[in-house]
Image (cartoon, grey):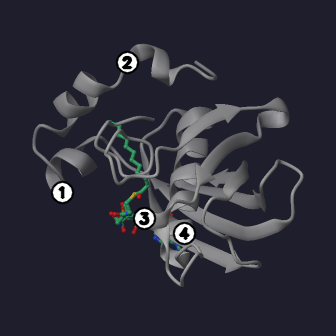
Amino acid sequence: MHYDQCFGCGDVESGLHMRTTVGEHMVVHSRFTVTEAHQGAPGLAHGGLLACAFDEALGSTVGNLLRKPAVTGKLETDFVRPVPVGTTLYIAARLDGVAGRKIYVSAEGRLGSADGQVAVRARALFVQVGFEHFTTHGYADALQRFRSTTRESKWDINP
Ligand SMILES: CCCCCCCCCCCC(=O)SCCNC(=O)CCNC(=O)[C@H](O)C(C)(C)COP(=O)(O)OP(=O)(O)OC[C@H]1O[C@@H](n2cnc3c(N)ncnc32)[C@H](O)[C@@H]1OP(=O)(O)O
């Protein structure tokens, strides 16, 4: 689900520039490369930025697999290992279940490769919302903004 001004997946210079693909067994893969702009301690990723990357990866999982608008209600992160600047975090996310409007997803991020050491684990509850969520609480012309920046092909799995 793309919006070009999204901090996670959009084209904003300071953003995370994350891209997502759907793999076998409906595992959704995202990558996030930690830059100097993402530091907390010297040379290490800020935990809040890592949480942001997982929010994006998990939100993309909901968007790609369910194609329903939803927002994060709850996000939990376990920071297992430090993530140095220059590292690419390989995030694999799964849809764990749906109960009414509640959507449960989880992910783990590995250092440097898809089979690297686990550095971060996350779980989230997304809540399905109507499009009016965005037009009421965000910009009134939110839908036009989405449409003007969302190519139809970007809604395809593995465009
Ligand atoms: C055009 C395409 C655009 C597509 C654009 C997609 C953009 C994605 C962006 C990336 C993701 C984000 O960062 S989203 C931005 C960060 N998140 C937000 O801003 C959300 C702010 N919060 C809210 O707006 C609201 O609290 C909602 C929508 C989450 C829920 O409010 P609601 O609609 O009134 O629903 P409510 O009845 O309260 O909750 C529904 C069910 O979920 C449960 N629930 C709700 N929150 C929680 C919670 N924190 N922990 C446990 N459970 C919870 C409730 O108990 C209930 O369970 P039960 O009684 O049914 O059992």
Confirm whether residue 136 shows in the render. Answer: yes
Residue located beneath label 2 in the image: 151
Mark 2 Cα shell of 10 Å, populated few (<14), some (14-19), many (≥20)? few
Q: Position of residue 106 (x, y in %)?
A: 70, 59
Q: Is residue 152 left or right of residue 19?
A: left
> Split into 4 quadrants, where in the image is the N terminus?
top left
Q: Earlier in the sequence, mark 3 or mark 1?
A: 3
Please state which amino acid type lies under the numbered disc 1.
Answer: His
Q: Are marks 2 and 1 in contact (CB under 8 Å)?
A: no
Residue marked by disc 3: 37
* Helix, strand or loop under label 3: helix
| Helix, strand or loop under label 2 | loop
Decide which of tag 3 and tag 4 comes sooner along the chain: 3
Please provide percent x and percent y for residue 94.
74, 49
- Relative to the observer, which residue lies in front, 100 or 121? 121
> Is ligand 1 within 8 Å of the beta carbon of the residue shown at mark 1?
yes
Percent across and percent down for residue 101 are 51, 53
Query: Residue at (51%, 52%) from the top-left corner?
Result: 56
Q: Which residue is mark 1?
A: 137
Q: Earlier in the sequence, mark 1 or mark 4?
A: 4
Q: How many marks?
A: 4
- Tell me the SS state at disc 1: helix
- Residue 51: numbered disc: 4
Disc 3 to disc 4: CB gap under 8 Å: no
The local crowd at label 3, few if under 14, some if 14 to 19, many if 20 or more residues have their Cα within 10 Å, is few
